Amino acid sequence: MDIYMQVLGFLLCLSLLIFVHELGHYFFARLFHTRVEKFYLFFNPGFSLLRMKKIDGRFQFSFFSPKAPEEWAAHPDATEWGLGWIPLGGYCSISGMVDETKSAEDLASEPQPWEFRSKPAWKRFFIISGGVLMNFITAVVIYIAIMFTWGREYIPLENAKFGLIFSDAAQYAGFQNGDQIVEVDGVMPHTIPDFVKKLLLDNPREVVVLRNNQLDTLHLKADDWKKILGDQFSTFNFPFVIEEVMSSSPAARAGLMRGDSLVGLDTLQIFTFADFQQEFRYVKNREVTLHFYRGDSLHSALVVVGEDGTIGVKVNQFKYLQVVTDNFSFLESIPEGIREGVNTLTFYVKQFKRVFTKEGATQVGGFISIGNLFPKTWDWKHFWTMTALLSIVLAFMNILPIPVLDGGYILFILIEMITGKKPGDKFIGYANTVGLVLLIALMIYVNGLDVFRLFR
């Protein structure tokens, strides 16, 4: 059931972002009196789940149809709205525009007043930019709603009294589990995201940590950070206190209960969740002795660690780390939401260059990676936060100057504005074909990496 929640969250998010993106194109097209032939959520090769068109003031519907009813052709000024059956995209087919739905040969010999190609360059610029603009506006609106509804929750780094747990890449750079961050190039980061952003974008040279109650300075190399792209660099350390015992789990069979605080495994004296996670990986499918406190009494129990390296319990780190919540009124939420959207876009743009490094090229991901960003249990705050983030990512990726993407069309329009010469429809068609091939190759690559990681 957990995987279904992830898939549902991913598809719902993707559907919303595609809809608002194409709605941006539709809005500016209609604003400038340009016909929109089709508006589809999801792709519909072969047939459509739903087609509808407003004729004489009333919507007519067609279900599971390979093509539109013939009588609809007599109303070309009305948009055909539809739902395809491949839930991985969508499109807005604008009259007189060479795009993924039609080539130059499909256009009439003479441009018509209601067509995209008949409009001046500045109007075409806004029609193409509408999708990207709508995605960014959507992200900002969501961030405003999040700030107003939930506020901003975070754990200050100064509250990390048990230190941090670091990834393999971070430990390679010199960090050790349990380190507390004091300064990065003389500045104290406020949160873990601030810390990671400073490492990724500022190429710091020194990090001061508190290790075993003593200050230590780590001298970093530029190459240390090439490996952390896409890596969960650090998380908070906290005690292993059971919040929930799953039914029929190894922990349940051993008699462990909610509130038990684990303090040892066989002869090891450990107490943090990260330490137990690491040790459990070494004793999969083996029986071990766990030592734990229940109230003020020390107990022991024999537990068989599962083949996945877990014992079937849930924990709650936030019980032991002071979470700070900044609450905002509706009016206060507006500038905070705008600031969050701008900061998110700025960070994404700055770190995008790392995708073109050797390490970055191996750490990108496709649909599986994106789907894994959604939790296995439904969480509205997490859903909307991820939707806002992905809306900004979609806006930025679409603005890249690659033919067949919005950025490719914008590039052609800007060239026309500067030179006064409009690229031919056939040239744009050929460029789109090349761009589509590159885009398909990229999709195969990133999703192939996902499959490789899945089996690895």
Image (tube, rainbow, N blue to C red):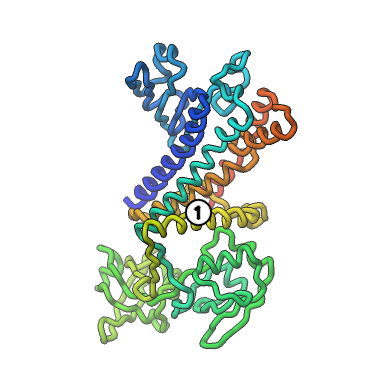
> Is residue 437 visible from the viewing direction of this image?
no
Horizontal relation, residue 128 to residue 326: left or right = right
Q: Nearer the viewer, residue 185 or 44?
A: 185
Location of residue 17 (image quadrant) = top left
Q: Position of residue 435 (x, y in %)?
A: 64, 35
In this view, 133 is above or below 180: above
- Which residue, given by chain and number where applicable, does mark 1 sit on? 341
> Is residue 154 visible from the viewing direction of this image?
yes
Residue projecting furthest to the right: 419
Q: Position of residue 321 (x, y in %)?
A: 39, 75
Q: Position of residue 233 (x, y in %)?
A: 53, 66
Residue projecting furthest to the front: 331
Q: What residue is at 49 percent from the left and 70 percent from the top?
A: 191
Q: Nearer the viewer, residue 239 or 413?
A: 413
Q: Position of residue 50 (x, y in %)?
A: 37, 26
Horizontal relation, residue 32 to residue 10: left or right = right
Q: Nearer the viewer, residue 287 or 261?
A: 261
Q: What residue is at 49 percent from the left and 73 percent from the top?
A: 165
Q: Secondary structure at mark 1?
A: helix
In this view, 21 is above or below 332: above
Q: Nearer the viewer, residue 275 or 123?
A: 123
- The amino acid beneath tag 1 is Gly
- How many numbered discs sit on the rendered protein? 1
Location of residue 109 (image quadrant) = top right
Q: Residues within 10 Å of mark 1 (few under 14, many from 20)?
A: many
In this view, 259 is above or below 135: below
Q: What residue is at 32 percent from the left and 78 percent from the top?
A: 261
Q: What residue is at 53 percent from the left and 37 percent from the top?
A: 130
